[in-house]
Amino acid sequence: MKVMVWEVASGQIRYMMLEETERGSFVGNVAKDLELDMDKLSNNGVHVISTGKTQYFALNMENGHLYTSQKIDRETVCGQILKCLLKFEILVQDKMKVYTIEVEIIDINDNTPRFQMEQLTFSIRETTAQGSRFLLADALDPDVGINSVQRYELSYNKYFSLYVQAGESGIKNAGVILENSLDREEKAFHNLVLTAIDGGDPVRSGSVQIHVIVLDANDNAPVFTQPMYKVSVLENIPSGFVLTAVKATDLDEGINSEISYTFRTKSEKISQIFQLNSQSGEISVQGNLDFEEQDFFEIDVQAQDAEGLSSLAKVFVTVMDTNDNAPEITISSFFTSVSENSPSGTVIALLRVEDKDSGENGKVTCLIPPNLPFQLQKSVDNYYTLMTDGNLDREVVEHYNLTITATDRGTPLLSTTAYFPIKILDINDNAPIFEEIFYKSYLFENNPTGASLMMLEANDPDWGTNSTVIYSILDGNDPTASVASLLSVNTETGVVYALRPFDYEEFQQINFQVRAQDGGSPPLSSDVSVTLFILDQNDNAPQILYPSVPTDGSTGVELAPRSSEADYLVTKVVAVDADSGQNSWLSYQLLKATEPGLFSIGLHTGEIRTARLLLDKDVLKQSLVVLVKDNGQPSLSASVTVTVVLADSIPESLSDISSISIPADPQSDLTFYLVVAVAFVSCLFFTFLLVLLAIRLHRWRTSQLCHSGSGNFTGVPVSQFVGIDGVRAFLHSYCQEVSLTADSRKSRIFFPIGSCTNTLTHHQASGEPGFKFLPEDLNIANEAQASQESQHSLNLKLLL
């Protein structure tokens, strides 16, 4: 096998090899000739791309050698074409590079010349002049060049000699020349052997028997009106179209002048495409002319009379191209997806565009729609590269159905469209975005644990895992409370839940942040501020601050002088409500009174005032039940019992106050026993106090007694709220002289002017709450002991 490298330049290689080589024969070292790395050859996606239907060659990926994939018959592949070239491309997909390979198939002498007929018979009139020529059938040899028919040999005969003439196409036509006159009577038949010999090595030959019949008297051969006919025709003419008509004349008359026309060399292809009318000489089309398959035909037409005289004419048919082939788009490599962060110029596809037409009809223009982030560039020969042109954004367009149109320049224009579906792959380039820039929600206090407060929603325009949003709560700015202990958020839905009941009185609002984070790598996130406002509910009853409920079991008493006029301020009930708004608006009302109509209370101030002048018939001890109610829904309330003692002076009140028992609950026996116990303890305390006073009197008998004061308590608050501590404060503030007589139920207390250091003004007395008087805390003798004692005077100065 003979193989050589003809040319290596500009990415194009030409090899030469003999035909009929066995399958797997070595053609060339492509890796070496193209300077490819043999170690990486198998990993680079190298492919052999053939334009024909048959793949004649294969590339060994291990050593880079090119081999034949089957036996190649040059005559089958190229026919009578002198230079037989097989062209294909080698694609290195990783480098996106194409190399053109041409392999020239060298003809070998593998075909023997042969004649179409085993025996050739023709007739010659005996009157034929010496030197007359008779064309013989040509031998056919599929080989070309030197391997085709080079010469003819004729067996020896004294009447005939061989002549050979070469046509314009190089085909040698054989014939015989009549060297001597024929005499039918001497010899009516002549048998000759014509041998065709090619120029191959070894030489091959074929022969045919020629049987010559000698006839009488036809001494003129037909003569064509012109030796050559030229016809140009479009390839798309219909079947039956007449190309031309050949014409020959014969000077003979009668039957000897009748001429018939035949194709002298009638190949199979010519027989399929053309038809010759033997009588008229018209050559018409009966098959399909295809410029892309064969654009030129040379036809030999023979005119022969009845006696066998003939002549030859050439008919040259030129097929002209029409735009009957649309461009063809062949995809060599194509990536169906590309990442949205791919740089401009990223190669997506490599394709080949080819039009089988010629001239302007074969020139192709490839276009893609405008305003798309893609471009189409021509690379090598008819190859185009599709690449990105600009930035891709999956969130704007996630899929392109790119259309590539290849249009030729023929008339009419023909085009082919190829569709390239390109999917844009997502990257995590978008953070989640909340629907609002700030969220606020309202919730009534005392909510149940696990109550749903609100739903936050953030959207991520990315795809798949990159668009998965996970919610979490960030601690707010409040250092006293951790938001994580108060609230939780569903990581998938964004619903915020309360982890415990909230108390408006504890805090009125909660400020926190919620973060939305996607599932990309690296993850992206965004935060939003949320304020939860706690709304108040009426869950706190009013709390009475004054009068306060004693903790030692005593009963607080308010004093009201009998000389009080109407609208006199006796005391004031002070209450607060921990709620807010209208839930904390308080109203006061007398729920129960000993004498209805005697006292009134301010609806919103809580001030207890006399509603009329006090009368002597009014009961000394007045019990008022005050109800304090808020304005909530439902309304909550609290009540307190205020005891008011009607007295013009403190001694009078002190003498009567012992008769005031602790208000008892008629339905509680425990209260009764407590009162009895307190009374008993008080008696023991009074006895001890009397003994102590007697001892002190004996020691201070020489001391000057305090001067008597007015019987009335001038400058003393007539309404003082006094308990044990109040009595001590009261006695500490004044120097007192107590005078007890056996026939008097009243006690007199004298206040020396010089020793009174904390005297209250009348204005202070009327505007401030009074003291509490507690019977068990007063050092006063009861009336039974006073009636049994003789009248005496006791001056006592108490300093407590």
Image (spheres, grey):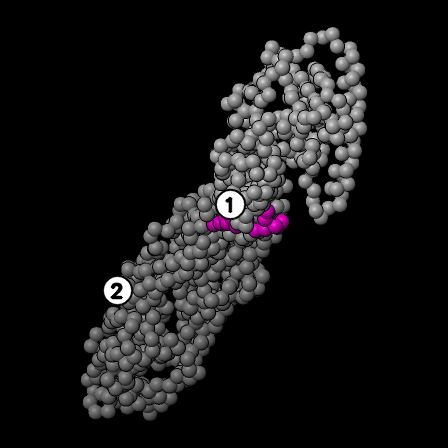
Residue at 39%, 50% (x, y): give it: 374
Give the x, y percent position of residue 557. 63, 33
Which region is colored magenta? 442-462
> Could you tell me which secondary element the residue under label 2 belongs to?
loop
Q: Is residue 236 magenta?
A: no
* Residue corresponding to mark 2: 411
Q: Quadrant of residue 750?
A: top right
Type of residue at label 1? Asn
Residue at 51%, 31% (x, y): give it: 564
Q: Quadrant of residue 149?
A: bottom left
Residue 631's tag is 1
> Could you tell me which secondary element the residue under label 1 belongs to?
loop
| CB contact under 8 Å: marks 1 and 2 | no
Of residues 311 and 612, the one nearer the viewer is 612
Q: Is residue 451 magenta?
A: yes
Quarter of the image with the C terminus is top right
Q: Label 2: how many residues lie within 10 Å, few (<14), some (14-19) or many (20+)?
A: few
> Mark 1 and mark 2: span between their CA atoms?
96 Å
Type of residue at label 2? Thr
Give the x, y percent position of residue 15. 48, 54
Residue at 58%, 45% (x, y): give it: 592
Q: Label 1: how many residues lie within 10 Å, few (<14), some (14-19) or many (20+)?
A: some
In the picture, measured across the screen, residue 135 lies left or right of residue 36, that is left
Q: Quadrant of residue 756?
A: top right
